[in-house]
Every structure is written in C-alpha cells, then in structure tokens.
Amino acid sequence: MKCSEKWVYEMNYRAAIITIDSYNYGNRLQNLAVQVLLSSYRMHVNTFKRRSNQLNKKNIKNIIKITAGFLNKILGIRQTRLLEYNRLYRFYKFNKNYINWDKRTLEAVCHTNYIDKHYDILITGSDQIWNYKFPFNSKLNLLAFGSDKLKRAALSASIGNIELTEEEKILFSKNLPRFDAVSVREDSANAILRFIRDDIVTLLDPTMLVDESYWKKKLKKTKLKIPRSYVFVYFLGDMESKIYKFIDKVCAESSLLIVDVNDIKNPYYGVDPIDFIKLIDSSEYIFTDSFHCSVFSILFEKKFSVYDRFGSQMHVSIRTDELLHKFDILDRKNIFEISKMEQVDYSKKELILEQERKRADLFIRSVLADSY
C-alpha cells in the first residue's frame, strides 16, 4: 500500500516526541525542527517533558547553584548568578514560545494508559538520544513503554559513539524490533545497529530537513543588536591554544570582534536559540567544535572551520566528520590558514538537501502508511 498525500493529510495523527530536554542550543533547535517537520504532515505534535532535564522557573535557581560555582572564580557571585539566570531564562522562554509540550513528564505517565489514550505515534529523536554515555538517557528513549497498538519510529537518532557496550546491545536488541521504522543520523550508527535490523535509513539532522526559509523567517523577528563585523566562536569542549591564536590572528588582520555565546565575559553570553542562529548567519567567520553550529554554517553557506573537541572522551568528531563528508566539504576540518577559510565550495549543497529531504519525506510517509 502506497501512501498518497491526501491519505496522509486525512489521518491527523497525534504524535509525541521523545527527545533530550536540555538547555543546549542544538538540542532545542532540533526539537523545534522535528515539531515543524511532523506538523507539516498535519500531525498534532507534542513533546514530552523529561523529569531529569526539564527547565522551568522552579529549578532554574537550583541549576544555577550547580553550574555557576566554577564561574564565581571569574566574576563576582551576584553577577555570575544573574548572567546564568538570564541565560537559563532565555531557554525557558524559548521552550514556552516555540515547543508544544505535553503537560506531563514522560516518566510520570510511561507506565499508565495515558499515552495510549492521547497518542497514535511515538517519535524518538533526534540528537544523541541513544548515546548512553549520557546519564540522563534511559531505555525510555527506545520507546520501551506503551502498547503495541502505538506506531513507533526513530527520526535521525544519534548514538554518538563508534560501538555499543554489551549492556547496550541487549537494550537495543530488546526494543528496536518493536519499531515500525528506524532512521539514524550517522552511517556509523546504522552500521552499529545492523546486527538487529537491516532496514535502517540514514537521514540528515532535522534542522536540515526543514527548509532554510523557515529559519530565515524566524531570524527576522529577533531584536538582537549585533556588531557590524565579527567572528562567531562556539566551543562545547576546551579550546586548544593554537585555535585561540588563529582566531586572534584572523580578527587582527580583518579588524573583527569576537562573539562567543559560551564566554561569560562576552556581552552575547547566553543568547536564546533563535539569536544563536542569527549570530551564525550574520558572522564573517565561524569557529566551532559543535555539530549543530556546523549544520547552520552549512545551511547559511558561511565561512567556517570545525575542530576536534579537545578534552572529550567521546567520539565527538564522528558526527561532524560525517556531516562534512555528506556535503563534500571535508576541507572545513581543522583550518589554521586564513586563505583556506575563504575557500568554501557549496556548489553541491542544494542538490544534496533536495535529495535528502525527499528521502526523509518518503520515510515519514511510509511510517504513516504502514508500508515501510
């Protein structure tokens, strides 16, 4: 049975997104992208809050007490907590304004009949939802709850590692066969899980499956005042000294300012997720070790370099390496020459995006049609 467009649009599925609920830019933007993507098929879409990760007014103060400790050595305690509060509050406002939430946490209802009553399909993804090196990820991310009447699908799920532990192999073997369809974000994840199923599809991150015009439209609404000429710096790991030196050299030669949203001394510290991509879009150059910062650099055709994440025990570079390989721009890796920053070949980007979005469309339609 093939799924016609009319058939899909008449279904009006009630879909629940199960993902990581954190105050990380890439995570929040992929959550929004999954919501937008599924809603385009006239699904009623909600995201489940997670008990361990949810951000609300009550726990913002508790999070600040934990995360601001090391920053107090840099700034006074009052100023530090104020800056941290503002950062977390911007994420809270983003969640409130952009994400459709189920009022209950997943942990509170997963062992009841609530999900069966209120939803038709469960979508897990995207981001590193299956990276069990993260303590907040659980078997719930493998949709190990609910009746067999529910449709189950994984949308661009990421493992973020090159192999599974024996315990993880058992976990995936038990739960993955229940899925109606599975797509992952990296070919490496596809290869890892092939011993369980051979019908897994590799798809782009949802932020790239949503048309750039959607993001550009959101950027028009931002009131962020940005500098005239600057480089955008975004590192989730430690930055090696030679990267610092190279950025300083680029700025000195072109009279550019530095915007670093992770530097508490920087005036742009802790902007909200929409302003985050606005700063990417308006920058002269981008330096990062972040997957999603690289994603938006490609979408907006920016001059950028992505570096291996220093100080991390995880195989972080797998994700960015596969992304660069997909768009045939592996020369964006670990650049330390100004001339190379200028030479970015995006000639294949539009064709690749068109092809990948068609593949994602077929995947989603086939899930809805029970024909995958």
Image (cartoon, grey):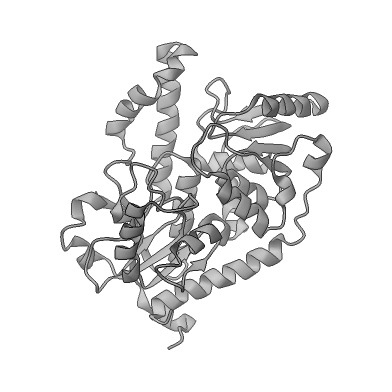
Confirm whether residue 210 shows in the render. Answer: no
Quadrant of the image containing the C terminus: bottom left
Spot occupied by residue 48 in the image (x, y as percentages of width and height): 31, 53
99 left or right of 258 in image? left
Confirm whether residue 140 shows in the render. Answer: yes
Judge by depth and name the residue closer to the eye, 145 or 68: 145
Q: Is residue 219 above or below residue 326?
A: above
Quadrant of the image containing the N terminus: bottom left
| Residue found 40% across the figure and 21% down from its top | 68
- The residue sitting at the front extreme is 166
Q: Is residue 204 above or below residue 88?
A: below
Q: Is residue 273 above or below residue 241?
A: below
Question: Which of the 4 quarters of the picture holds residue 369?
Answer: bottom left
Spot occupied by residue 293 in the image (x, y as percentages of width and height): 59, 44
| Residue found 61% across the figure and 32% down from its top | 225
Judge by depth and name the residue closer to the eye, 273 or 290: 290
Question: Which of the 4 quarters of the picture holds residue 169?
Answer: bottom left
- The residue sitting at the left extreme is 112
Spot occupied by residue 248 in the image (x, y as percentages of width and height): 73, 24
42 left or right of 337 in image? left
| Residue found 76% across the figure and 34% down from its top | 336
Spot occupied by residue 120 in the image (x, y as percentages of width and height): 29, 70
160 left or right of 215 in image? left
Question: Which of the 4 quarters of the picture holds residue 238?
Answer: top right
Q: Is residue 297 above or below residue 310?
A: below
Q: How many marks?
A: 0
